[in-house]
Image: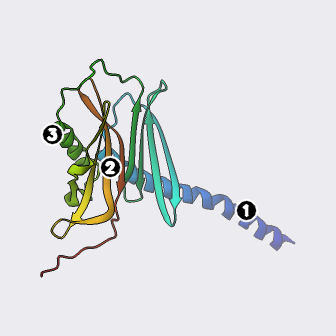
Amino acid sequence: MKKIICLFMTFVIFLSVVPVFADGEISRAMEEVLVSVKSKVDIPSEFTEFSPHSYQEGDKTCYTFSWSKKEAGAYIDVYCDSEGRISRYNFFDNSLSSKKKITSLTKDYIIEFAEDFVKKSVPEAEAELFYDEQSWSVSANTYELIFRRRVNNHAEVKDNYVRLRIAVYDDVAYVVNMVVSYNYDAKFYNKKL
């Protein structure tokens, strides 16, 4: 009987230790990813509330990091994989409004602003991404544009792109949404004809 109780107690102790160890591993991995993400995205100092989450996509661990202001109505959400590669970015601040009906920012400025954001937030893919001039779209104070993946003499890779939505308030541009659809595992080799 003592052996059974001893085995039972050992089993209970083992079960209580395993989740703590697993949580510690997840926290360390999450912290490393967070450091990578924060080097790619600027978080304003007034966004003091922070909430991290992890989830599974198939067999891969992914993360969502959310920052918000203490008072409601403003947030930044960043979704990424376990390598810290950003797949989605969202920004909202209901205190932003525009007194101007028409911005003085040019199309070239908006494109350059978008290129700079992509270079910083998606550095792993930036070398293969090219602005698609056909993607330019304007609606009120919001601009949408797409950078497509091109390899081997600018051959487009289907379903590999970065789409940005940029809002302008009183001549200040903000990326309000970015979606990254990019197959990092795909390999392409230059073929000589």
Image quarter hosting the N terminus: bottom right
Q: Crowding at label 3, few (<14), some or many (≥20) Cα neighbours within 10 Å? A: few
Which kind of residue does numbered mark 3 sit on?
Asp
Question: Which residue is identified by label 1?
Answer: 12
Is residue 165 at all visible to an observer of this figure?
yes
- Expressed as whole percent of the image width and height from the top left, the position of residue 56 reads 52, 59
From this view, report whether residue 144 is shown above or below residue 5: above
- Expressed as whole percent of the image width and height from the top left, the position of residue 136 reads 25, 44
Q: Quadrant of residue 108?
A: top left
Specify the label residue 163 is tagged with: 2
Q: Residue at x 51, y 48 (%)?
A: 53
- Give the CA distance from mark 1 to mark 2: 50 Å
Q: Quadrant of residue 43?
A: top left
Please indicate whether residue 102 sits to the left or right of residue 34 in the image.
Answer: left
Which kind of residue does numbered mark 1 sit on?
Val
- Expressed as whole percent of the image width and height from the top left, the position of residue 97 reads 35, 22
Q: Crowding at label 1, few (<14), some or many (≥20) Cα neighbours within 10 Å? A: few
Specify the label residue 90 is tagged with: none
Which kind of residue does numbered mark 2 sit on?
Arg
- Expressed as whole percent of the image width and height from the top left, the position of residue 160 reads 32, 61
Q: Are marks 2 and 3 in contact (CB under 8 Å)?
A: no
- Give the CA distance from mark 3 to mark 1: 64 Å
**Mark 1 or mark 2: whose residue is earlier in sequence:** 1
Q: Give the structural element (helix, strand or loop) at label 3.
A: helix
- Residue toward you, 157 or 72: 157
Specify the label residue 108 is tagged with: 3
